[in-house]
Amino acid sequence: MNRNAALYLTLMAAGAIGFGCHRQTAGTESSPFRIIATDAGFQAPNTMSAGLRHVVMENRGSMIHEAMLVKLPKGMTPDAYIAAVRKGSLFPEGATDYSGPGLTSPGNSAEMWLKVDPGQYIIICWNGNHASTIPVHTFTVEDSGAADDRVPREDVIVKLIDYRFEIAGDLRKGEQVIRVETPGPSMHEMDIYRLHEGRTVADLREWRKKDEADMQGPAEALGGALDSHDISHVVWLRKNFTPGHYVLHCEMPVTNAPADSKMKHDDLGMVREFEIED
């Protein structure tokens, strides 16, 4: 997410989410909620069952996209939400971020498991100016009594803390399931990048500061976990890592920073490099 202004939020009270993920959560296999991101908008189902859900986003556009799930408050229409965004609001009053697949380069896909509650939602991309220029997708989360989707056993746990990433376990070549927790106390997100040969994390940070969604950059965006207003929420990602140099990166705005400072969590050190060996 690329929101270049200060956060003025009160975080929701944290509490245990109750999704202890050992072998698998209780539930049955079901088809993922599939999101197709394009430069013209999103294609996705119109309904989803409440609970822990498997979400897959595929980027078929020519630019980097993400898919934030936002629950609208009663009485707010998608048009009203976008109108607030166009007036400069990063978090229109009453709307609640529920995470979602992070920044993903064209031709790539991102896979995650996250919890959703009943209500009216939109899917929105916050990369560059997409939040105000690319149409959102509306859908309803229904209290249908469906069992939670199964989550594969996690291989690695990543904690998003002010202002660092803590990794428990070994990130390695091949398919891995990553459990993402946010002890906070601030809201955070985690985008995963694979640097192109010869490029550095300094190149990545300079590129992201330019805030131009269609620019070719020094890295490939591989998805990640967007922020949630309820920081007690846990999400899981499934990634297939190939050998290379990777970066974890958080672009959340710094709380109470001047609105024109554009200071983000990566400016406070929330960047972590790691290598995947062959």
Image (cartoon, helix red, strand yellow):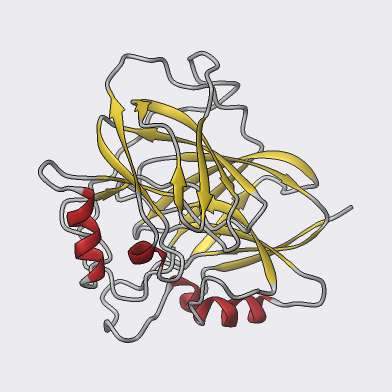
User: Looking at this rendering, what residue extends furthest in the right direction?
Assistant: 278
The relative height of residue 4 versus residue 21 in the rendered view (above or below) is below
**Front-lying residue, 65 or 155:** 65
**Front-lying residue, 201 or 216:** 216
Classify the position of the N terminus by image quarter: bottom left
Task: Give the total of numbered labels.
Answer: 0
The relative height of residue 205 versus residue 136 in the rendered view (above or below) is below
Going by the image, does 32 lie left or right of 85? right
Residue for point 72% across, 77% down: 200
Residue for point 52% across, 28% down: 32
Residue for point 30% across, 30% down: 141
Percent across and percent down for residue 186 are: 34, 60
User: Looking at this rendering, what residue extends furthest in the front direction?
Assistant: 40
Percent across and percent down for residue 257 are: 29, 80
Residue for point 45% across, 47% down: 42
User: Looking at this rendering, what residue extends furthest in the left direction?
Assistant: 75
Percent across and percent down for residue 96 are: 26, 48
The relative height of residue 73 versus residue 133 in the rendered view (above or below) is above
**Front-lying residue, 224 or 183:** 224
The relative height of residue 267 versus residue 8 in the rendered view (above or below) is below
Going by the image, does 156 lie left or right of 7? right
Percent across and percent down for residue 179 are: 55, 40
